[in-house]
Image (cartoon, helix red, strand yellow):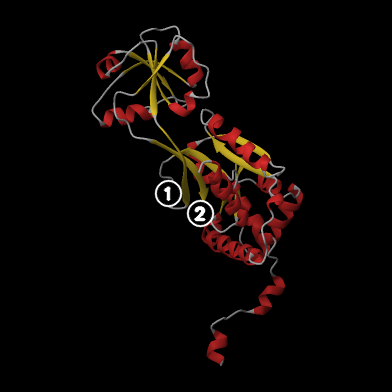
Amino acid sequence: MNMIHNKTNLDMSIFNHIDINLYPLFITIYEQRNISKAAKILCITQYAASHALQRLRLHLQDDLFVRAGSKMLPTPFAEQIYPSVQNALFAFQNISKQKQQFDPSSVQTLRIAIHDEIEPIIFPKLIHHFQKLNLTIQFLSTKLDRKNVIADLAAQQVDFVIDLEQNYGDKINYQNLVQNHFVICSQHTNINSELYFASPHIGVSSRRTGLLLEDIYLNQAQFRRQIFMRCQHYSTALQVLAQYPDAMLTIPKQILAHLQVDQSINIFEHPIDLPVLNMGIYWHGALNENSRHIYLREEISKIFA
């Protein structure tokens, strides 16, 4: 009897001095590195957040965070306890929701980070679908920053990221939504691989440097092409293309479908067999069992089924 009881080993007297409500603040400051942002996310004043942090510091007998410029950086002790605190809060969250049936009307916002060239493919369908469900949702589209995808999803700055398929690590989950492929735009009336590589090309990327995706694929097949202009938007590239009869633009077909194309421009299948472009939805693995997230993922998947 005693041995069974001792396996739990809970010191109930400690709970008289623990305020569990302080720990969501700890997690939020840790992830945001900023007490003002943490207060805003938790819908409390900065004064209340500062006061609560001081109480937690006294209880845990550690500074937890030290100021470095505009950031609040975690102490070694805060780094040590973060995973345990996060897991404990997830456990409380899951327990509290086990007997609750999810109400779709409780979804007030849907925040998605997405590339601005992909946005026209996704958002009109997304909004149309949820309007048919008679849900009043505020849709928030933010510019995709691939360097911060993991951090943004972990801190729940966005609900989802929609992007081309790539590996963001074990903690980030991916589900494919649509497939796309490259086509070629040009004023030429016919093209082949020889003409394609002999012609000047317009490249499109929001990045300052680095190979374009199509060039990565071409280089893997031992092909090279000449980029005479690099711009940020396909709409710009199409306008320039209308002025340069010899130029070519390689563009995903679904993106092209949402753009205005001059009547002088012809559309061709690519002469080189390039890989299919998979595009889908990313979310943080910590939210796999979250009922709100499950509902949103299922509904978004229906749109592109």
In the structure shown, which secondary structural element does the residue marked by tag 2 occupy? helix
Q: Residue at x 53, y 31 (%)?
A: 121
Question: Nearer the N terminus, badge 2 or badge 1?
Answer: 1
Q: Can the viewer see residue 239 in this picture?
A: yes
In the structure shown, which secondary structural element does the residue marked by tag 1 occupy? loop
Q: Residue at x 39, y 31 (%)?
A: 181
x and y percentages locating residue 286 in the rendered image? 53, 56
Q: Can the viewer see residue 155 in this picture?
A: no
x and y percentages locating residue 64 in the rendered image? 60, 56
In the depicted view, which residue is nearer to us: 208 or 57?
A: 208
Q: Alpha-carbon neighbours of circle 2 within 10 Å: few (<14), some, or many (≥20)?
A: some
Per the image, the residue denoted by label 1 is 169
Mark 2 residue type:
Gly
- Up-down relation of residue 196 to residue 170 (above or below): above
- 134 horizontally vs 263: left or right: right
- Up-down relation of residue 194 to residue 159 (above or below): above
Q: How many marks?
A: 2
CB under 8 Å between discs 2 and 1: no
Mark 1 residue type:
Gly
In the depicted view, which residue is nearer to us: 96 or 42?
A: 96
Quadrant placement of the N terminus: bottom right
In the depicted view, which residue is nearer to us: 167 or 7?
A: 167
Per the image, the residue denoted by label 2 is 285
- Up-down relation of residue 184 to residue 18 (above or below): above
Instruction: Find the distance from the CA under tag 2 to the CA under tag 1.
Output: 10 Å
x and y percentages locating residue 58 in the rendered image? 67, 63
- Up-down relation of residue 191 to residue 43 (above or below): above
Q: Residue at x 59, y 61 (%)?
A: 90
- 87 horizontally vs 251: left or right: right
